[in-house]
């Protein structure tokens, strides 16, 4: 293999039944979102193909409306418990779980991720999100969702507390000296004593510093505020981008912000989502995709669209009319709202067409073709500084992932763009991220 210096990173974004909203209706797809065997199979496929990580999103609310009852998206595993189970049936692949900063407490999140980092031998990442589903508020003692600015302010402080707690113990704090009876060195324990606007947390954490020092911090907001937080805190950014030019602009912008936080470019990896359908010919790939598209009920597509635009109910608008003018979302993802609005304009899509258009990849970059065509595109993005790697979304699980792993990954390997063997053991090692020093102990 031509082992070029820069290698691309691959995440397998696992979603129950697959990413296509109608995947569960397809005859080849196991329709139970709580079937662990599907996740186990997908994880093992991804690990055999040497993916860097498995990625699991989250939402802590059920929409419960009529269109939702036609999807398989109302029940799913909690990401950390799922990853705990997956960590026992895999050995090397990274495990990235989403946990919201809006409806959680930092001590709990710090503890759970540190525990799983120990259990998995240093393979964990935390996808820090600010909750794009407004309904979550009502499951956590509130009538209203927190606004965009407040969610991000809370997220920033949340991150500071979590990382401070992860650094509670020096790496060599535990002496376990049976002769002297000294279990740990009290001089190597740091009490955080955090008192901020949103949180009061004394610490220390009741988990030793974890194998990676700190689990990898991933972030998935792409608005102006989201980019600032990412530049300050994230080590991986997952983002939705529709074109090479947009992705290049996002990449340059985000990397350009790192300097003011004293960070170098390599300390943050940008991984846009890529929705992929593979076929032996382009026609076959398109036919495969169409088989899913035919299963999309119009009201299901429009309900998904309403959520992705930032929690809007679009059910009263005509399907054959244009996308209505909507206010800037305060409860959802601003970046996705902008992306979808631009997409509707650029392709002159009706509401119904746009809903159908995003039924597979929810607005993520879409690649439908042969392994060579797909590899060409991924290579162009990677070499064109639009991406350090990709979070791969497949329409259906586990088959879609298997097709990518056995057809596209070998093509990327042949081109010297992707590893044939894991070089390291931890997620940080896979991604080429340094193990953070503990600032409390020199
Ligand atoms: C690619 C991507 C994936 C996301 N995944 C989740 C998720 O799983 N759960 C969640 O609550 N929010 C998710 N978000 C939204 C984030 O919480 C985000 O911080 C918030 O909605 C604000 O987005 P914005 O910065 O684009 O306005 C995701 C966002 C993007 C761009």
Image (cartoon, rainbow, N blue to C red):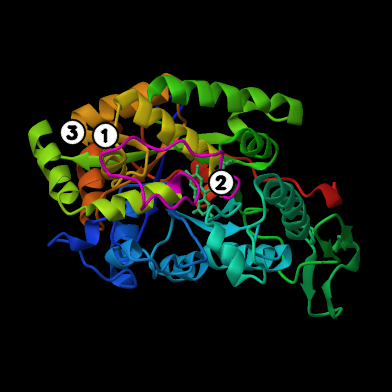
The answer to whether any part of residue 416 appears in the image is no
Image: magenta residue range: 308-331
Residue 271 % position (x, y) = 46, 37
Q: Which badge, 1 or 2, is on the more N-terminal residue?
A: 1
**Is 75 placed above or below 154 here?**
below
Q: Nearer the viewer, residue 3 or 99?
A: 99
What residue lies at 21% left-to-right and 35% top-to-bottom? Answer: 368
Please, what is the dominant secondary structure of the magenta stretch? loop
Residue 168 % position (x, y) = 80, 61
Where is mark 2, residue-wise?
Answer: 428
| Mark 1 Cα shell of 10 Å, populated few (<14), some (14-19), many (≥20) | some
Circle number at residue 367: 1
| Mark 3 Cα shell of 10 Å, populated few (<14), some (14-19), many (≥20) | many
Circle number at residue 369: 3
| Mark 2 Cα shell of 10 Å, populated few (<14), some (14-19), many (≥20) | many
In the drawing, does residue 150 fall left or right of residue 36? right
**Ligand 1 neighbours mark 2 (CB distance < 8 Å):** no
């Amino acid at each position: 293999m031509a082992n070029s210096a820069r290698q691309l990173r691959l995440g397998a974004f696992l979603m129950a039944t697959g990413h296509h909203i109608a995947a569960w209706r397809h005859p080849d797809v196991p329709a139970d979102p709580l079937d662990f065997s599907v996740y186990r199979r997908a994880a093992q496929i991804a690990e055999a193909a040497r993916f860097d990580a498995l990625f699991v999103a989250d939402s802590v609310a059920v929409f419960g409306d009529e269109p939702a009852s036609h999807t398989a998206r109302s029940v799913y595993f909690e990401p950390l418990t799922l990853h705990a189970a997956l960590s026992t049936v895999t050995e090397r692949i990274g495990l990235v779980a989403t946990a919201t900063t809006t409806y959680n407490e930092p001590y709990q999140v710090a503890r759970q991720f540190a525990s799983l980092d120990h259990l998995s031998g240093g393979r964990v990442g935390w996808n820090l999100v600010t909750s794009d589903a407004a309904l979550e508020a009502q499951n956590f003692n509130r009538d209203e969702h927190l606004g965009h600015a407040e969610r991000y302010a809370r997220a920033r402080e949340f991150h500071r507390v979590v990382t401070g707690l992860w650094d509670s113990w020096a790496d060599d704090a535990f002496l376990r000296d049976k002769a002297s009876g000294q279990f740990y060195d009290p001089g190597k324990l740091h009490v955080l004593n955090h008192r901020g606007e949103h949180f009061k947390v004394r610490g220390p954490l009741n988990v030793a510093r974890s194998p990676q020092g700190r689990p990898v911090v991933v972030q998935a907001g792409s608005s102006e505020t989201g980019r600032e937080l990412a530049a300050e805190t994230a080590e991986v950014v997952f983002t939705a981008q529709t074109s090479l030019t947009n992705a290049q602009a996002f990449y340059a912008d985000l990397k350009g912000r790192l300097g003011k936080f004293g960070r170098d470019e390599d300390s943050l990896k940008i991984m846009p989502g890529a929705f992929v359908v593979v076929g032996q010919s382009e026609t076959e790939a398109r036919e495969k995709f169409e088989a899913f598209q035919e299963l999309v009920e119009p009201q299901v597509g429009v309900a998904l669209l309403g959520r992705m635009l930032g929690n809007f109910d679009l059910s009263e608008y005509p399907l054959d009319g244009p996308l209505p003018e909507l206010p800037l979302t305060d409860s959802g993802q601003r970046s996705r709202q902008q992306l979808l609005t631009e997409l509707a304009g650029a392709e002159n899509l009706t509401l119904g067409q746009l809903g159908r258009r995003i039924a597979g990849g929810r607005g993520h970059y879409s690649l439908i073709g042969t392994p060579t065509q797909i590899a060409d595109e991924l290579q162009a993005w990677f070499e064109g500084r639009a991406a350090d790697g990709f979070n791969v979304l497949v329409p259906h699980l586990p088959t879609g992932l298997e097709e990518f792993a056995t057809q596209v990954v070998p093509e990327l390997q042949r081109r010297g763009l992707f590893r044939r063997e894991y070089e390291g053991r931890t997620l940080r090692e896979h991604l080429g991220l340094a193990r953070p020093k503990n600032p409390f102990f020199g």
